[in-house]
Image (cartoon, rainbow, N blue to C red):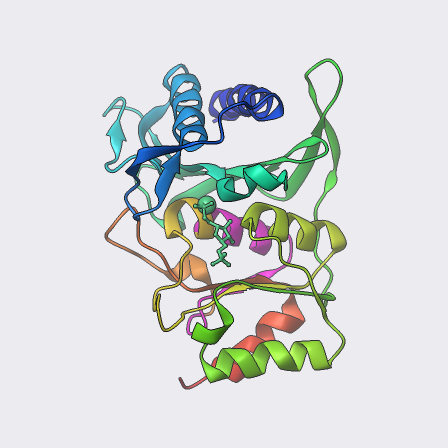
Protein backbone atom coordinates (compact mmCIF):
# COMPACT_ATOMS: atom_id res chain seq x y z
CA UNK A 1 0.00 0.00 0.00
CA UNK A 2 2.96 2.35 0.63
CA UNK A 3 3.81 2.26 -3.08
CA UNK A 4 0.24 3.26 -3.94
CA UNK A 5 0.43 6.22 -1.53
CA UNK A 6 3.82 7.27 -2.94
CA UNK A 7 2.38 7.29 -6.45
CA UNK A 8 -0.61 9.32 -5.26
CA UNK A 9 1.90 11.86 -3.89
CA UNK A 10 3.63 12.09 -7.29
CA UNK A 11 0.28 12.57 -9.03
CA UNK A 12 -0.86 15.38 -6.76
CA UNK A 13 2.45 17.24 -7.12
CA UNK A 14 1.96 17.13 -10.89
CA UNK A 15 -1.70 18.24 -10.61
CA UNK A 16 -0.70 21.13 -8.33
CA UNK A 17 1.81 22.29 -10.96
CA UNK A 18 -0.90 22.15 -13.64
CA UNK A 19 -3.19 24.24 -11.42
CA UNK A 20 -0.56 26.84 -10.58
CA UNK A 21 0.09 27.90 -14.16
CA UNK A 22 -3.28 27.04 -15.58
CA UNK A 23 -4.24 28.55 -18.92
CA UNK A 24 -7.23 26.49 -19.92
CA UNK A 25 -10.32 26.85 -17.69
CA UNK A 26 -12.57 25.53 -20.44
CA UNK A 27 -15.21 22.87 -20.31
CA UNK A 28 -15.09 19.80 -22.53
CA UNK A 29 -18.14 18.76 -24.55
CA UNK A 30 -18.48 15.58 -22.46
CA UNK A 31 -20.28 14.75 -19.23
CA UNK A 32 -19.17 12.40 -16.46
CA UNK A 33 -21.26 9.52 -15.08
CA UNK A 34 -23.23 11.85 -12.77
CA UNK A 35 -24.06 14.27 -15.57
CA UNK A 36 -21.60 17.08 -14.70
CA UNK A 37 -19.98 18.72 -17.73
CA UNK A 38 -16.29 17.94 -17.37
CA UNK A 39 -13.66 20.65 -17.26
CA UNK A 40 -10.56 19.92 -19.32
CA UNK A 41 -8.80 20.08 -15.97
CA UNK A 42 -10.98 17.28 -14.50
CA UNK A 43 -10.01 15.07 -17.42
CA UNK A 44 -6.33 16.06 -17.23
CA UNK A 45 -6.21 15.35 -13.47
CA UNK A 46 -7.81 11.96 -14.06
CA UNK A 47 -5.18 11.17 -16.71
CA UNK A 48 -2.33 12.16 -14.38
CA UNK A 49 -3.64 9.99 -11.54
CA UNK A 50 -4.28 7.05 -13.86
CA UNK A 51 -0.72 7.34 -15.23
CA UNK A 52 0.87 7.20 -11.75
CA UNK A 53 -1.45 4.53 -10.33
CA UNK A 54 -0.74 2.28 -13.31
CA UNK A 55 2.91 2.37 -12.24
CA UNK A 56 2.17 1.20 -8.68
CA UNK A 57 2.14 -2.50 -7.79
CA UNK A 58 -0.85 -3.94 -5.96
CA UNK A 59 -3.79 -2.32 -7.75
CA UNK A 60 -6.59 -4.45 -9.08
CA UNK A 61 -8.78 -1.67 -10.48
CA UNK A 62 -9.53 2.05 -10.50
CA UNK A 63 -12.84 3.83 -9.93
CA UNK A 64 -12.87 7.52 -10.83
CA UNK A 65 -15.51 10.23 -10.78
CA UNK A 66 -14.42 10.95 -14.35
CA UNK A 67 -14.59 7.34 -15.65
CA UNK A 68 -17.94 5.76 -16.53
CA UNK A 69 -16.81 2.24 -15.64
CA UNK A 70 -14.39 0.64 -13.23
CA UNK A 71 -11.00 0.28 -14.97
CA UNK A 72 -9.40 -3.15 -14.50
CA UNK A 73 -5.61 -3.02 -14.15
CA UNK A 74 -4.66 -6.48 -12.87
CA UNK A 75 -7.18 -9.07 -11.73
CA UNK A 76 -4.63 -10.84 -9.49
CA UNK A 77 -3.83 -7.76 -7.42
CA UNK A 78 -5.39 -6.73 -4.14
CA UNK A 79 -6.50 -3.09 -3.98
CA UNK A 80 -9.28 -1.08 -5.60
CA UNK A 81 -8.47 2.64 -5.63
CA UNK A 82 -11.46 4.99 -5.95
CA UNK A 83 -10.83 8.70 -6.43
CA UNK A 84 -12.24 12.10 -7.24
CA UNK A 85 -9.43 13.60 -9.34
CA UNK A 86 -10.36 17.23 -8.75
CA UNK A 87 -12.99 17.95 -6.15
CA UNK A 88 -14.47 21.45 -6.29
CA UNK A 89 -13.11 22.00 -9.80
CA UNK A 90 -15.91 24.45 -10.63
CA UNK A 91 -14.18 26.83 -8.16
CA UNK A 92 -10.85 26.83 -9.99
CA UNK A 93 -11.77 30.06 -11.84
CA UNK A 94 -12.21 31.95 -8.54
CA UNK A 95 -8.91 30.56 -7.18
CA UNK A 96 -10.45 28.83 -4.15
CA UNK A 97 -8.78 25.83 -2.55
CA UNK A 98 -9.77 22.55 -4.16
CA UNK A 99 -8.57 18.98 -3.75
CA UNK A 100 -8.21 15.34 -4.78
CA UNK A 101 -9.70 12.47 -2.75
CA UNK A 102 -8.60 8.80 -2.71
CA UNK A 103 -10.02 5.67 -1.06
CA UNK A 104 -7.99 2.45 -1.00
CA UNK A 105 -10.19 -0.65 -0.62
CA UNK A 106 -8.94 -4.20 -0.12
CA UNK A 107 -10.31 -6.76 -2.61
CA UNK A 108 -13.55 -4.90 -3.38
CA UNK A 109 -15.08 -1.43 -3.21
CA UNK A 110 -17.00 -1.70 0.06
CA UNK A 111 -16.93 0.67 3.04
CA UNK A 112 -15.95 -2.14 5.42
CA UNK A 113 -12.98 -2.93 3.16
CA UNK A 114 -11.58 0.59 3.30
CA UNK A 115 -7.96 0.39 4.43
CA UNK A 116 -6.71 3.92 3.80
CA UNK A 117 -7.95 7.35 2.77
CA UNK A 118 -5.85 10.13 1.32
CA UNK A 119 -6.69 13.64 0.27
CA UNK A 120 -4.73 16.56 -1.13
CA UNK A 121 -5.65 20.21 -0.75
CA UNK A 122 -4.38 22.64 -3.37
CA UNK A 123 -4.39 25.91 -1.45
CA UNK A 124 -1.86 28.51 -0.44
CA UNK A 125 0.28 25.44 0.30
CA UNK A 126 0.03 21.90 -0.98
CA UNK A 127 -1.07 19.71 1.91
CA UNK A 128 -1.77 16.03 2.14
CA UNK A 129 -3.69 13.99 4.69
CA UNK A 130 -2.99 10.25 4.86
CA UNK A 131 -5.15 8.12 7.12
CA UNK A 132 -4.54 4.48 7.93
CA UNK A 133 -4.94 4.54 11.73
CA UNK A 134 -4.95 8.26 12.60
CA UNK A 135 -5.20 11.06 9.98
CA UNK A 136 -1.75 12.56 9.49
CA UNK A 137 -1.18 15.99 7.97
CA UNK A 138 1.83 16.56 5.66
CA UNK A 139 2.98 19.73 3.92
CA UNK A 140 5.14 20.05 0.78
CA UNK A 141 8.49 21.77 1.34
CA UNK A 142 10.77 23.58 -1.16
CA UNK A 143 12.44 20.28 -2.07
CA UNK A 144 9.14 18.74 -3.17
CA UNK A 145 9.03 16.47 -0.11
CA UNK A 146 5.99 15.98 2.09
CA UNK A 147 6.95 16.76 5.68
CA UNK A 148 4.86 15.44 8.57
CA UNK A 149 3.11 18.27 10.47
CA UNK A 150 0.75 16.66 13.00
CA UNK A 151 -1.99 14.14 13.71
CA UNK A 152 -5.55 15.43 13.22
CA UNK A 153 -7.85 14.81 16.19
CA UNK A 154 -11.30 16.34 16.64
CA UNK A 155 -12.61 17.83 19.88
CA UNK A 156 -16.01 16.68 21.12
CA UNK A 157 -17.69 19.89 19.95
CA UNK A 158 -16.85 22.51 17.34
CA UNK A 159 -18.00 25.93 16.14
CA UNK A 160 -18.36 25.50 12.37
CA UNK A 161 -21.61 24.77 10.54
CA UNK A 162 -21.24 23.95 6.82
CA UNK A 163 -24.24 22.70 4.89
CA UNK A 164 -24.48 22.14 1.14
CA UNK A 165 -27.42 21.97 -1.23
CA UNK A 166 -29.75 24.74 -2.32
CA UNK A 167 -31.58 25.96 0.78
CA UNK A 168 -34.98 26.21 -0.87
CA UNK A 169 -34.73 22.46 -1.52
CA UNK A 170 -33.84 21.51 2.09
CA UNK A 171 -36.42 19.65 4.21
CA UNK A 172 -37.94 21.53 7.15
CA UNK A 173 -36.16 19.11 9.49
CA UNK A 174 -32.79 20.04 8.01
CA UNK A 175 -33.57 23.76 7.92
CA UNK A 176 -34.56 23.74 11.60
CA UNK A 177 -31.55 21.65 12.59
CA UNK A 178 -29.07 23.98 10.83
CA UNK A 179 -30.79 27.02 12.35
CA UNK A 180 -30.64 25.49 15.83
CA UNK A 181 -26.85 25.19 15.53
CA UNK A 182 -26.59 28.85 14.45
CA UNK A 183 -28.80 29.78 17.41
CA UNK A 184 -26.25 28.03 19.66
CA UNK A 185 -23.49 30.25 18.24
CA UNK A 186 -22.09 28.16 15.39
CA UNK A 187 -20.57 30.09 12.47
CA UNK A 188 -21.20 29.54 8.78
CA UNK A 189 -18.15 28.33 6.85
CA UNK A 190 -18.93 26.89 3.42
CA UNK A 191 -16.79 27.24 0.29
CA UNK A 192 -18.45 24.67 -1.98
CA UNK A 193 -15.42 22.37 -2.16
CA UNK A 194 -15.86 19.53 0.31
CA UNK A 195 -12.11 18.99 0.66
CA UNK A 196 -11.64 22.57 1.89
CA UNK A 197 -14.74 22.58 4.07
CA UNK A 198 -13.86 19.28 5.74
CA UNK A 199 -10.18 20.21 6.03
CA UNK A 200 -11.20 23.36 7.88
CA UNK A 201 -13.32 21.38 10.34
CA UNK A 202 -10.48 18.87 10.90
CA UNK A 203 -7.87 21.60 11.42
CA UNK A 204 -10.06 23.80 13.63
CA UNK A 205 -10.88 20.77 15.77
CA UNK A 206 -14.60 20.26 15.13
CA UNK A 207 -17.93 21.30 13.71
CA UNK A 208 -20.42 19.88 11.26
CA UNK A 209 -20.43 19.33 7.50
CA UNK A 210 -23.76 18.33 5.95
CA UNK A 211 -24.86 17.47 2.45
CA UNK A 212 -28.47 16.44 3.06
CA UNK A 213 -31.17 14.83 0.99
CA UNK A 214 -32.92 17.64 -0.92
CA UNK A 215 -36.17 17.77 -2.88
CA UNK A 216 -34.21 17.87 -6.16
CA UNK A 217 -31.60 15.29 -5.07
CA UNK A 218 -33.12 12.81 -2.58
CA UNK A 219 -29.83 10.87 -2.41
CA UNK A 220 -27.76 14.01 -1.91
CA UNK A 221 -24.99 14.98 -4.27
CA UNK A 222 -21.80 13.53 -2.88
CA UNK A 223 -20.65 10.19 -4.20
CA UNK A 224 -20.17 7.31 -1.78
CA UNK A 225 -17.04 5.51 -2.98
CA UNK A 226 -14.68 8.40 -3.67
CA UNK A 227 -16.07 11.33 -1.65
CA UNK A 228 -18.19 10.20 1.30
CA UNK A 229 -16.56 6.92 2.46
CA UNK A 230 -12.96 8.22 2.44
CA UNK A 231 -13.94 11.26 4.54
CA UNK A 232 -16.16 9.20 6.88
CA UNK A 233 -13.13 6.95 7.48
CA UNK A 234 -10.92 9.98 8.22
CA UNK A 235 -13.46 11.62 10.54
CA UNK A 236 -14.09 8.44 12.51
CA UNK A 237 -10.33 7.80 12.89
CA UNK A 238 -10.01 11.42 14.13
CA UNK A 239 -12.51 10.72 16.98
CA UNK A 240 -15.34 12.20 14.94
CA UNK A 241 -18.58 10.63 13.74
CA UNK A 242 -20.60 10.22 10.55
CA UNK A 243 -24.18 9.50 9.58
CA UNK A 244 -26.56 9.64 6.62
CA UNK A 245 -29.29 10.83 9.01
CA UNK A 246 -30.59 7.29 9.57
CA UNK A 247 -27.56 5.10 10.22
CA UNK A 248 -25.01 5.25 13.00
CA UNK A 249 -22.14 5.44 10.53
CA UNK A 250 -21.81 6.17 6.83
CA UNK A 251 -19.41 3.23 6.77
CA UNK A 252 -22.39 0.87 7.38
CA UNK A 253 -23.82 1.72 3.95
CA UNK A 254 -23.54 -0.40 0.79
CA UNK A 255 -24.33 0.57 -2.80
CA UNK A 256 -24.45 -1.39 -6.05
CA UNK A 257 -23.44 1.41 -8.40
CA UNK A 258 -19.92 2.87 -8.36
CA UNK A 259 -21.25 6.42 -8.85
CA UNK A 260 -23.98 6.16 -6.16
CA UNK A 261 -24.50 9.22 -3.97
CA UNK A 262 -25.77 9.49 -0.39
CA UNK A 263 -26.82 12.21 2.05
CA UNK A 264 -23.94 12.68 4.47
CA UNK A 265 -23.11 14.32 7.78
CA UNK A 266 -19.59 14.44 9.17
CA UNK A 267 -18.56 16.11 12.37
CA UNK A 268 -17.55 15.93 15.96
CA UNK A 269 -19.42 14.01 18.64
CA UNK A 270 -21.79 16.71 19.85
CA UNK A 271 -23.11 17.75 16.44
CA UNK A 272 -23.63 14.22 15.12
CA UNK A 273 -25.42 13.16 18.32
CA UNK A 274 -27.70 16.17 17.99
CA UNK A 275 -28.31 15.34 14.33
CA UNK A 276 -29.33 11.79 15.19
CA UNK A 277 -31.80 13.08 17.81
CA UNK A 278 -33.36 15.48 15.31
CA UNK A 279 -33.45 13.08 12.35
CA UNK A 280 -34.56 10.11 14.52
CA UNK A 281 -37.74 8.41 13.42
CA UNK A 282 -37.96 10.04 10.00
P1 LIG B 1 -17.36 18.03 -7.81
O1 LIG B 1 -16.71 16.75 -7.36
O2 LIG B 1 -18.00 17.90 -9.17
O3 LIG B 1 -16.45 19.22 -7.72
O4 LIG B 1 -18.65 18.31 -6.85
C1 LIG B 1 -18.60 18.08 -5.50
C2 LIG B 1 -18.70 19.38 -4.74
C3 LIG B 1 -18.24 19.20 -3.31
O5 LIG B 1 -16.88 19.51 -3.19
C4 LIG B 1 -19.09 20.20 -2.57
O6 LIG B 1 -19.26 19.84 -1.23
C5 LIG B 1 -20.37 20.17 -3.33
O7 LIG B 1 -20.05 19.76 -4.64
C6 LIG B 1 -21.01 21.54 -3.36
O8 LIG B 1 -22.28 21.45 -3.88
P2 LIG B 1 -23.38 22.63 -3.65
O9 LIG B 1 -22.89 23.78 -4.47
O10 LIG B 1 -24.65 22.02 -4.17
O11 LIG B 1 -23.45 22.94 -2.18
MG1 LIG C 1 -16.07 15.92 -5.82
Q: Magenta stretch?
A: 229-247
Relative image position of residue 17 (x, y in whole percent): 59, 20
Image vertical order of residue 16 relative to residue 240, above or below: above
Q: Which residue lies at the image location 40% right of the left edge and 71% below the top edge? A: 214
Q: Which residue lies at the image location 75% right of the left edge and 21% below the top edge? A: 141
The reply, left or right, for residue 153 in relation to residue 8 is right
Question: Is residue 249 covered in magenta?
Answer: no
Q: Is residue 118 visible?
A: no
Q: Is residue 177 visible?
A: yes
- Residue 189 or 265: which is nearer the viewer? 189
Image vertical order of residue 160 relative to residue 193, above or below: below
- Residue 70 or 186: which is nearer the viewer? 186
The reply, left or right, for residue 124 in relation to residue 233 is right
Relative image position of residue 228 (x, y in whole percent): 45, 52
Image vertical order of residue 29 relative to residue 169, above or below: above
Relative image position of residue 110 (x, y in whole percent): 34, 48
The quarter of the picture where the C terminus appears is bottom left
Amino acid sequence: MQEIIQNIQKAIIEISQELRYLKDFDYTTSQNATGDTQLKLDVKSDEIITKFLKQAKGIKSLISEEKQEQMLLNENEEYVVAYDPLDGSSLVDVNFSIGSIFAIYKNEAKAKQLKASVYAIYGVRLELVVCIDIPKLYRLNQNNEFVFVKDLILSEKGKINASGGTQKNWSNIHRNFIKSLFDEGYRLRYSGAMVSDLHQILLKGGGLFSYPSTSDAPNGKLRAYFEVFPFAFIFEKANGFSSDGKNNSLLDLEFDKIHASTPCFLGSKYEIEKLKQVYKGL
